[in-house]
Amino acid sequence: MARKKIALIGAGQIGGTLALLAGQKELGDVVLFDIPAAEGTAKGKALDIAQLSPVEGFDTKYSGSSDYKDIEGADVVIVTAGVPRKPGMTRDDLVGINAKVIDSVGKGIKQHAPNAFVIVITNPLDAMVGLMQEVTGFAPEKVVGMAGVLDSARFRLFLAEEFNVSVEDVTAFVLGGHGDTMVPLLRYSTVGGISLHDLVDMGWTTKERLEAIVQRTRDGGAEIVAHLKTGSAFYAPAASAIAMAESFLKDKKRVIPCAAKLNGEYGVKGLYIGVPVVIGSKGVERIVEVEFNADEKAMFDKSVAAVQSLIDATNKIVGR
Ligand code: LMR
């Protein structure tokens, strides 16, 4: 079987972590790409991780580059290019800089990796993944945004800590945009298959504590930015994108929340937003439409409106 190729656009903190995880999971050979000014970082990190591979015991070829030709034939492209936020900023404040970056990166991917499954991590996520799909012109099922996996992982962790149980036994979904209006769905979250509603009745927690966990999930990225001060989270975002890449490369058909382009599902057309999807070898193979109650629908609609205004801002910046 031919070895797969994974191109990582952006050799910053997330890019380096992605490169390491892709190797440890033997997903394919890795090209770490960055702009010419950061080519040394891309090459240095690639070489450093390659030298770790004998210790860890995996066979992955690594290279660093600032030439788009080197992403030729990539099966998966993961985009982290752009700048992270600093304390006091929202993700939306990044739109001015990052829209231009995605516009340029999208053109490089379109020309050099036309068959790739593209996963966007750059913020503000929902608008940036939409821009990527428009610039590349790739089929919507081949361009997705990484957010729901990350937000849901945070939600699962906080719930597991609340109940003092394994994270493995907690399922949870966070839908909507990857911003302050995201929609953590308590009703679809379970602990060992038991609903949170039942756990409140059983006295394991209270509605107030669950609401606090919902808010902490919404603020999950900002909490880390406040600690790091110079940038944003990178381990969990990288692991989340790798889970998506792995589902695609191995045709695992995992059901995971991602920013996907809706075509009438949830009453929304032509916009990327976080919903549960099935990821397999064709990319996004199915969009799962869960039923909302009135409160959930109102939260989701608010999130759609927030994403739409970011898309409008993005279009002005790149003149679309
Ligand atoms: C995150 O949620 O960690 C990322 O979107 C980065 C950020 O700015 O919060």
Image (spheres, rainbow, N blue to C red):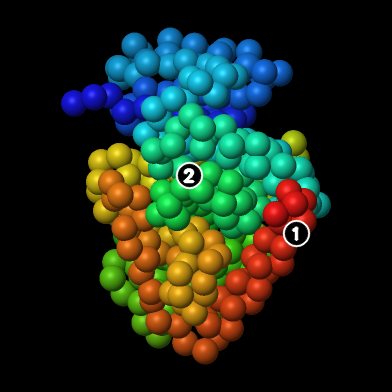
- SS type, badge 1: helix
Q: Is residue 216 visible?
A: no
Residue 154 lies, in percent from the top left, at 51, 56
Residue 168 lies, in percent from the top left, at 33, 54
Callout 2 amino acid: Ile
Q: Earlier in the sequence, mark 2 or mark 1?
A: 2
Q: Nearer the viewer, mark 2 or mark 1?
A: 1
- SS type, badge 2: strand
Comparing 46 with 200, the one in front is: 46
Quarter of the image for residue 67 reads: top right
Residue occupying image coordinates x 29% and y 66%: 192
Residue 208 lies, in percent from the top left, at 58, 78
| 261 shown above or below 54 | below
Residue occupying image coordinates x 47% and y 51%: 144
Residues at marks 2 and 1, CA–CA distance in whole angstroms: 22 Å
Q: Is residue 76 visible?
A: yes
Quarter of the image where the N terminus is located: top left
| 235 shown above or below 194 | above
| Residue neighbourhood size for the residue with mark 2, other residues' Cα within 10 Å, grouped as few (<14), some (14–19), many (≥20) | many
**Residue 48 relative to residue 196: left or right:** right
Q: Mark number for residue 119?
A: 2
**Residue 188 relative to residue 122: left or right:** left
Q: Mark number for residue 313?
A: 1
Residue at the far bottom: name it. Answer: 294
| 293 shown above or below 302 | below
Comparing 27 with 284, the one in front is: 284
| Residue neighbourhood size for the residue with mark 1, other residues' Cα within 10 Å, grouped as few (<14), some (14–19), many (≥20) | some
Residue occupying image coordinates x 25% and y 48%: 252
Comparing 56 with 108, the one in front is: 108
Quarter of the image for residue 305 reads: bottom right
Callout 1 amino acid: Ala
Q: Mark number for residue 280?
A: none
